[in-house]
Image: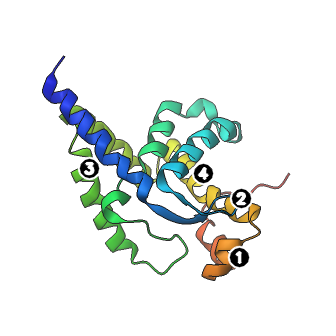
């Protein structure tokens, strides 16, 4: 066992515990409170298992998808959560998140840092099938929450159906 490696991994685990403190603008389906980033990532991981059948599952590396959904919001420890339907400067957000990714994943041993940064970047670039699936779920989950709460949070924040449709127009729509 390499004590330095183990120490770096434990420090990373301690650091990412902060994800539990990052509240999102999505309300839990029982409308009791806002969800946090850790809950969101867990919920997405379960959604991966359940909804995989609606994607070309043979073409996807499922392990990579799980890593993406579990790592995608870790950067918000430093960069903060940006509301998807707000008026954020997305170029500034991207720079803050890149800096955060380097710092947080940089706590890990070199090869794990490289792997996690690569997975996070792949998610952000949204070119691979795995990234497209993960990002589609990331967009879908708040829609599901708002559907189940009759739009509670989106009504409070002035999110219209036009905003939701415009933000999600890159995803193919199918009709049963």
Q: Position of residue 76 (x, y in %)?
A: 37, 59
Residue at left 23%, top 32%? 111
Residue 149 vs residue 176: left or right?
left
| Residue count near mark 3 (Cα–Cα under 10 Å), binned few <14, some 14–19, many ≥20 | many
Query: Can the viewer see residue 73?
Result: no
Where residue 93 sits in the image (x, y, percent)? 35, 69
Mark 4 or mark 3: which comes first in sequence?
Answer: 3
Q: Nearer the viewer, mark 3 or mark 1?
A: 3
- Give the residue furthest to the right: 176
User: Which label sits in the foreground, 1 or 2?
Assistant: 2
Q: Which residue is mark 4?
A: 137
Q: Nearer the viewer, residue 71 or 170?
A: 71
Quadrant including the N terminus: top left
Q: Which residue is mark 1?
A: 161
The answer to which of marks 3 and 1 sits earlier in the sequence is 3
Q: Residue at x 40, y 72 (%)?
A: 90
Is residue 121 placed above or below 146 in the rendered structure? above
Q: Earlier in the sequence, mark 2 or mark 3?
A: 2
Q: Earlier in the sequence, mark 1 or mark 2?
A: 2
Label 2 neighbour load within 10 Å: few <14, some 14-19, many 20+: few
Q: CA distance from mark 4 to mark 3?
A: 24 Å
């Amino acid at each position: 066992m390499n004590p330095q490696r183990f120490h770096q991994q434990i420090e990373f685990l301690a650091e990412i515990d902060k994800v539990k403190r990052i509240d999102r603008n999505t309300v839990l389906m029982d409308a009791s409170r806002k969800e946090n980033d850790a809950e969101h990532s867990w919920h997405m991981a379960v959604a991966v298992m359940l909804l995989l059948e609606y994607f070309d599952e043979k073409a996807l590396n499922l392990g990579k998808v799980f890593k993406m959904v579990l790592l995608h919001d870790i950067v918000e420890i430093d960069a903060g959560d940006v509301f998807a339907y707000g008026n954020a400067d997305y170029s500034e957000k991207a720079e803050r998140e890149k800096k955060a990714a380097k710092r947080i994943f940089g706590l890990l041993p070199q090869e794990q840092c490289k792997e996690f940064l690569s997975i996070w970047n792949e998610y952000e670039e949204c070119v691979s099938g795995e990234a497209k699936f993960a990002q589609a779920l990331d967009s879908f989950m708040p829609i599901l929450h708002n559907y189940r709460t009759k739009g509670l949070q989106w009504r409070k924040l002035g999110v219209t159906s036009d905003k939701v449709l415009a933000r999600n127009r890159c995803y193919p729509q199918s009709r049963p």
